[in-house]
Image (tube, grey):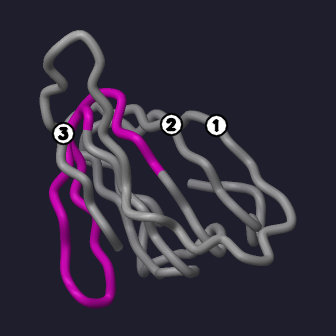
Amino acid sequence: MQVFQHQALDGLYAISTTNVLDLKGISEGLAGRVRIAAGTRSPEQGMRTSAAHEIAYVICGRLRIETEVGHHEVAAGDMLVTSPAEPHSTTALQDSELFFVLLDPLLAPTR
């Protein structure tokens, strides 16, 4: 998992990007928003994958993302990139909302 911490953008025109993403063979995608109440963990137990690649932008709140190799705390303005099909769980430390893009979704998103 890659985490891109929020950085202020200054000046008349500024841009912040991820690293180049290798998305060869992507056949479909799904985008949406999710709200997670403080204290809620998704999935309730274990870890999940929801797509070959997942990109998420934290609109508001704070979350703890756990992977098989460690954890990340993210907040409003941060972006996450998982690739490919990296198992993870999400726990909201505050009421939170994310915008996500699933590339080659494995199944419909669930709690």
Tag 2 and tag 1, C-beta contact below 8 Å: yes
Foreground residue among 10 and 85: 10
Instruction: Determine whether 39 is above or below 103 in the image.
Output: above
* Amino acid type for the residue under numbered disc 2: Phe
Segment colored magenta: 56-77
Q: What residue does disc 1 label?
A: 32
**Other residues around mark 3 within 10 Å, as few (<14) / some (14–19) / many (≥20):** some
Secondary structure, mark 1, is strand
The image quadrant of residue 7 is top left
Q: Can you give x and y, in whole percent of width and height, for residue 27 in the image?
A: 86, 66
- How far apart are the two marked residues, 2 and 3, measured between alpha carbons? 15 Å
Which residue is located at x 50 percent, y 76 percent?
A: 83
**Other residues around mark 1 within 10 Å, as few (<14) / some (14–19) / many (≥20):** few
Circle nearer the N terminus (2, 1): 1
Label of residue 6 in the image: 3
Instruction: Determine whether 83 is above or below 108 in the image.
Output: below
Circle nearer the N terminus (1, 3): 3
Secondary structure, mark 3, is loop
Q: Can you give x and y, in whole percent of width and height, for residue 17 in the image?
A: 36, 47
Q: What residue does disc 2 label?
A: 99
Q: Please state the total of marks drawn on the protein image.
A: 3
Tag 2 and tag 3, C-beta contact below 8 Å: no
